[in-house]
Image (cartoon, rainbow, N blue to C red):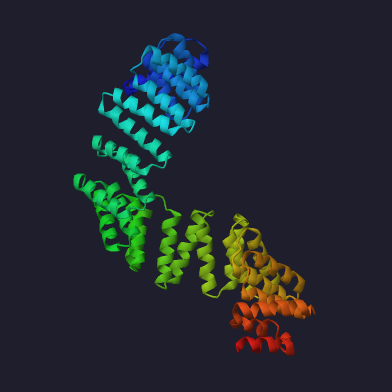
């Protein structure tokens, strides 16, 4: 469907239509005016107004094919597929060679996950299409259907056909690269993009994508050159400066990376990503005052960005300023109490401050949120042992063994705990298991259960394991 009314006429039609809705006076519009009004409302997402325009349009122009096609579009949006098909079948009888009818039929099929049938229907529409713009749109629709089918080679083929019609169809370009990425054909993507920039040498999008492909294969020098060409093509392209900054970081050129990140701050509103990266760069340069300033700016810019809170917490942790680290991780937890990394840091910092009950709570919360790493179970167990909560420690370790069976670190702890609680048969059982799994962890008994080590039977089992 073509929409070609001049902008002024379109605005006059819209104002007239909206005035009519307010006054309830029915005014006459020609079918082209209705089409442009409906198209406008669909583009801005005002579906209810589009539906009103379609109803009034069909009241005044009941034989308009285009208005009925808009009607099917709305029916598809409302998942009324049977109703949409009835309208389309009636239209097909009237205009069997109308490509738009087939496009809407394909849309109905696609929405019902019948993508193979949608492709076949679009191929019929393609045979009926007469102008390049319409053919390009159909290639794009067929490409998308193949994406839904995970047929990436076919999808690539049709998106490349889009570029044959319009070299600056960047949506098709992105989709082609998506296919290459999914298939992990990075060298092929590089070959394709190099060929593309030969034809369109000032395409910042292509240079940017080429740089990202070079990063993927770890050819950082070529990546850097590609991002520089993207910037030459468009010196306000924020994405290219960000990617160039990331590559410079990898090459340990931190001052140059900072320079590129700062350019993005000048070009657009500051982004938390750029602020965070600048902070990391200053951190690497040991310019700690500047590093922490940018970490502060990061969490101020985006309080929901977990990487910002983690960075500032780890910064103070590394400086051994555990009180400040705890202050910031508490702030982070107040914002998002379901973040596993926050609770893990909370537990570690409290442990360093010897706030053992708080540390144990942190590790428990970490486990409750699904972090089942061995070290988390062991750290919680060791704190419970220090607190004298031996039965809770045993329960914790038994749960840990479900996720990490046949683990010497767990078995040595269970042995020591059971001996401590005078469950000698269980103690012997776990100790024998432990030394069979890996006797090198016997230092656990010495460090956590020195009294248990004094038992002759324990020393006997440990000595036997060394022979």
Residue 255 image point, x, y percent? 34, 67
Left or right, residue 120 beside residue 403: left
Along the viewing direction, whichever of 51 and 264 lies nearer the viewer:
51
Left or right of 355 in this view: 72: left
Q: Return the residue nearer the eye: 357 or 190.
A: 190
Please name the residue shown 70% across and 75% down the image.
Answer: 414
Q: Residue 296, can we see it?
A: yes
Where residue 118 sits: x, y (%)?
41, 30
| Residue lying at 45% horizontally and 12% vertically, measured from the top left | 58
Please provide percent x and percent y for residue 451.
74, 87
Query: Splitting the image into 4 quarters, where does residue 248 fall?
Result: bottom left
Viewer-proximal residue among 76 and 226: 76
Q: Residue at x 37, y 29 (%)?
A: 120
Tally of marks: 0
Residue 296 left/right relative to 376: left
Residue 204, relative to residue 11: is it above or below? below
Residue 17 image point, x, y percent: 45, 17
Instruction: Determine whether 289 is above or below 199 in the image.
Output: below
Looking at the image, can residue 16 be seen?
no
* Quarter of the N terminus within the rendering: top left
Q: Residue furthest right?
A: 422
* Quarter where residue 249 is shown: bottom left
What quarter of the picture does the C terminus occupy?
A: bottom right
| Residue farthest along the left direction in this orientation | 198
Q: Nearer the viewer, residue 186 or 66?
A: 186
């Amino acid at each position: 469907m073509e929409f070609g009314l001049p902008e002024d006429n379109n605005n006059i039609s819209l104002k007239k239509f909206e005035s009519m809705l307010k006054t309830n006076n029915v005014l006459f519009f020609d079918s082209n005016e209705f089409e442009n009004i409906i198209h406008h409302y669909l583009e801005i997402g005002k579906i209810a107004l589009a539906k009103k325009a379609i109803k009034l349009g069909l009241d005044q122009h009941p034989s308009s094919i285009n208005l009925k096609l808009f009607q099917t579009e709305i029916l598809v949006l409302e998942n009324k597929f049977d109703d949409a098909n009835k309208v389309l079948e009636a239209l097909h009888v009237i205009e069997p060679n109308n490509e738009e009818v087939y496009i809407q039929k394909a849309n109905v099929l696609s929405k019902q996950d019948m993508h193979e049938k949608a492709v076949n229907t679009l191929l019929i529409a393609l045979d009926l299409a007469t102008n390049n713009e319409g053919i390009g749109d159909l290639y794009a629709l067929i490409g998308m259907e193949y994406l839904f089918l995970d047929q990436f080679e076919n999808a690539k083929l049709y998106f490349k056909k889009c570029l044959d019609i319009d070299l600056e169809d960047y949506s098709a370009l992105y989709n082609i690269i998506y296919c290459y990425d999914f298939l992990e054909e990075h060298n092929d993507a590089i070959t394709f993009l190099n060929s593309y920039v030969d034809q369109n040498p000032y395409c910042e999008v292509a240079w940017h994508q080429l740089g990202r492909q070079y990063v993927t294969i770890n050819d950082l020098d070529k990546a850097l050159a590609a991002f520089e060409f993207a910037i030459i093509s468009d010196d306000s392209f924020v994405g290219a400066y960000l990617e160039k900054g990331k590559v410079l970081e990898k090459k340990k050129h931190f001052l140059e990376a900072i320079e590129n990140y700062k350019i993005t701050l000048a070009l657009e509103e500051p982004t938390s990503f750029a602020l965070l990266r600048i902070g990391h760069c200053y951190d690497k340069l040991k310019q700690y005052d500047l590093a922490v300033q940018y970490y502060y700016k990061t969490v101020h810019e985006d309080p929901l960005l977990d990487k910002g809170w983690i960075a500032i917490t780890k910064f103070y942790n590394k400086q051994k300023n555990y009180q400040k680290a705890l202050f910031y991780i508490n702030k982070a937890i107040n914002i998002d109490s379901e973040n596993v990394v926050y609770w893990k840091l909370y537990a570690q910092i409290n442990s360093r401050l010897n706030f053992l009950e708080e540390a144990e709570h942190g590790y428990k919360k970490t486990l409750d949120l699904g972090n089942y790493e061995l070290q988390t179970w062991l750290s919680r167990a060791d704190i419970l042992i220090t607190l004298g909560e031996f039965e809770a420690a045993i329960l914790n370790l038994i749960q840990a063994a479900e996720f990490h069976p046949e683990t010497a670190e767990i078995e040595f702890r269970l042995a020591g705990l059971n001996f401590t609680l005078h469950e000698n048969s269980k103690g012997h059982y776990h100790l024998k298991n432990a030394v069979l799994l890996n006797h090198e962890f016997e230092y656990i008994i010495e460090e956590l259960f020195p009294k248990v080590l004094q038992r002759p039977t324990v020393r006997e089992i440990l000595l036997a394991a060394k022979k």
